Image: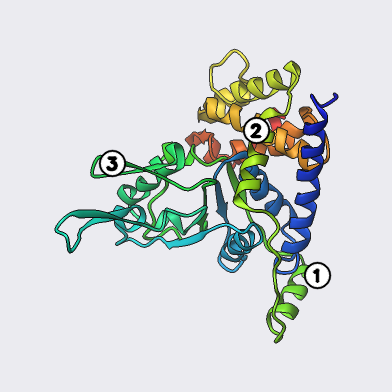
Amino acid sequence: MQASSNLDVESVDRLSKSYQDICKELAKVIFGQEEVIKLVLISIFSGGHCLLVGVPGLAKTLLVQTISQVLDLNFNRIQFTPDLMPSDITGSEILGEDRKFKFIKGPVFANIVLADEINRTPPKTQAALLEAMQERTVTVAGVNNALPNPFFVLATQNPIEQEGTYPLPEAQLDRFMFHILLDYPSFQEELQVVKNTTSAGKVVLTKMLSAKEIEEFQLLIRKIPVTDNVLEYAVKLVSKTRPNNQFATSQVNSFISWGAGPRASQYLILGAKCHAVLAGKYAPDIEDVQAVAIPVLRHRLVRNYRAEAEGLTTEALIKSLL
């Protein structure tokens, strides 16, 4: 399919080239994890949030910090703990010397917010992020405070140690565009990591994109045309995950309690558009939808007891639908 104008073609080519340059720059610090990096950048260019799940020591925090450096964005890290209060995230009002209340902004006022070990804090504090993630605003004492643009929450979670943790509510999980699983590095990648992190060399990163350019690219992604058959494929795929729906398979009816909502369809299309552009294409096809389907749907399907008893994973169910 031809792009709608020369300007669009140039912008698409520029985003595709920028993506390659960013990956080269990130490779100075992050070894392997190409698929994880790709998904995080797709979520950033699509204006979505990411949940990174992996065991300790897989450089989740380092990855987020490095991306914020390469993208020349303001970055704040919030370490989630059981005693963290909502005001520790959003900010609070204090009485000034002039005896008037003034709002002191919390760490959520940044372009990239790293919510480290987000499931370590009670739901009341987790909910402080909900409004920020969806509305891009923070309400304190009845006053709406706009967050900076662009704004992303990249949250991390440890899948092993569940003692003293609070599972994220489904409503909050649904706000994340992607649920990304990080795996152990390969032998060669780990060799490279150890070699580079135990020497005296210091890596200097070049800033590749400004906040304004990222906003322009986010607008560009929304302008990418999508054919009806790709739209229908994405919406039908999400409909298939809902038990007792006309498109649901017998496996879904047997093993799923709740399927994905309309937000999943939106993220499938946005993710497919961005995936296509990063590959140098001017419009997404069904393969682009399939490429982002697992991280989009992974956290939106609720398995029933039967699925858990039979050891059927969410990934296996999604793959059967693809």
- Residue lying at 74% horizontally and 71% vertically, measured from the top left: 190
Question: Please, is residue 265 above or below residue 217 in the view?
Answer: above
Query: Gap between marks 2 and 3, in whole Å?
Result: 32 Å
Which amino acid lies under the numbered mark 2 shown in the image of this protein? Answer: Leu
Label ID, residue 270: 2
| Labels 2, 1: front one | 2
Which amino acid lies under the numbered mark 1 shown in the image of this protein? Answer: Gln
Question: Element at badge 3?
Answer: strand
Residue identifier under label 1: 188
Question: Please, is residue 195 above or below residue 315 in the view?
Answer: below
Which quadrant would residue 25 be assigned to in this image?
A: bottom right
Question: Element at badge 2?
Answer: helix
Q: Nearer the viewer, residue 286 or 142?
A: 142
Residue 158 location (% of width, % of height): 51, 59
Sequence-first tag of 2 and 1: 1
Query: Residue lying furthest bottom in this view?
Result: 200
| Labels 2, 3: front one | 3
- Please say if the residues under marks 3 and 1 sit with CB atoms less than 8 Å apart: no
Residue identifier under label 3: 143
Residue 195 location (% of width, % of height): 75, 80
In the picture, measured across the screen, residue 287 lies left or right of residue 74, that is right
Quarter in which the N terminus is drawn:
top right
Give the mark count: 3
- Please say if the residues under marks 2 and 3 sit with CB atoms less than 8 Å apart: no
Query: Gap between marks 2 and 1, in whole Å?
Result: 34 Å
- Residue lying at 75% horizontally and 19% vertically, measured from the top left: 227
